[in-house]
Amino acid sequence: MQQRLHDECDDSYSRHSIVRIRRRGDCVRRQSDHTGVQLASHTTEPIRGAGHQRARGSSVGSSTPALRCSLSSAVHRPADLPDYEVPPIDEVAIGVQLVSPIEGFVDPHAGLFWERVKDRYPKAETHPRVESMPQPFALNPNLPPPLSFPFSPNAGSRTFLISDDDAYLLQIQNNRFFRNWRRRQEQEYPHFDELASDFQADLLVFRSFLADEGLRERPIGLFEVTYINWIADLAMHEFLRPASNTDLDTDGIRPWPETQTWQAAYGCTNETGDTVARLNVQCASATRTTESGFEQGTQFAFTFSEPADPVIDEQSLPELLTSARRAIVRSFTQLTTEPAHERWRRLQ
């Protein structure tokens, strides 16, 4: 995963606002709850062979099976959601963080789980663990961030299980489960419907593994979706509305800044006006390594975080996924300029 933008930013354009999330044509009807969830089981259907067709995208592996959740848990694109033919999306991460580590889960368990999904994720890597939930999530900024896990030498590491084409990975730790898609070699974006379905299916496989190993599931404390855009063909002031007013008219100074950083945290509310989630937006000039050397550009990231409801089932998990998608895509569209929309070939 590309290096995340730092959670702290001193830029003068940072601001806080309120965004109202809408679900099923109406506002969010749930109240915030930090107690976590247990997922209700539902079926998955294996789809095998290279002939499986994905809308605008490729399969997890060219000849490996893909899992799909049942139709009752499918995530469908809202008809009124903005769409782009060539979006600058570079990575999408969907995941859950638990209220506490799974008791008894150690690194060898990740290896045992790998055996169940090795046909789709044939490569594995070990990475440093993530020790706490993201700082920006505290719904009350006067409160400390929830669920911080102190470092322990016996806490274990984080395992990456990676698809053969390097585009998909699972991040497994004893207190978190994430699935990422990463653009590789001009690969088309497979779109969120498929990524959400595959995340749900892989999460069910993981839960089944825990049950078979006699490991007690921990409630989910936080649900999170991140979109990371990489924009190398436009300057920040050309695509980001807040950055478009940063030009100067002063002798001896070039009109546009050489680099910029912009950050905003938006509270997401339910129908009563209570903040139930947070949308964090970060935009900064960056350099990344490519096969041909280094590339200058801008990383433009959106992270939707929401504490779990008391229950996540076939209906509520797709609802969370749809809410995150709607908040991110609409905010992306409102924060970016019309010329940028033309460059990305906006369809609606």
Image (spheres, grey):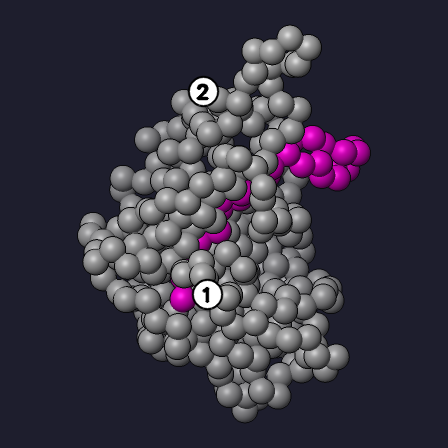
| Residue 56: x %, y % from top left | 47, 41
Image quadrant where residue 64 sits:
bottom right
| Residue drawn 54% across the image and 60% down it | 135
Any part of residue 143 in sight: yes
| Residue 250: x %, y % from top left | 60, 11
Indicate whether 202 appears above or below 272.
Answer: below
Comes first in the chain, label 1 or label 2: 1
Any part of residue 63 in sight: no
| Residue drawn 56% across the image and 37% down it | 11
Image quadrant where residue 163 sits:
bottom right
Q: Please rate how many residues cluster around mark 2, counting C-alpha atoms within 10 Å: few if below 14, some from 14 to 19, many from 20.
A: few
Front: mark 1 or 2: 1
Magenta stretch: includes residue 51: no
Q: Identify which residue, 19 or 250, lies in the foreground.
A: 250
Location of the C terminus (image quadrant): top left
Element at badge 2? helix
Q: Please rate how many residues cluster around mark 1, counting C-alpha atoms within 10 Å: few if below 14, some from 14 to 19, many from 20.
A: few
Indicate whether 256 appears above or below 27.
Answer: above
| Residue 3: x %, y % from top left | 66, 49
| Residue drawn 36% across the image and 40% down it | 330
Extreme residue in the bottom direction: 214
Element at badge 1? loop
Q: Main secondary structure of the magenta part?
A: strand
Residue at numbered disc 2: 339
Residue at numbered disc 1: 143
Q: Amino acid at mark 2?
A: Pro
CA gap between label 1 and label 2 equals 40 Å
Q: Identify which residue, 69 or 331, lies in the foreground.
A: 331
Q: Which range of residues does the magenta coloring cover?
A: 281-307
Q: Amino acid at mark 1?
A: Leu
Magenta stretch: includes residue 288: yes
| Residue drawn 41% across the image and 22% down it | 338
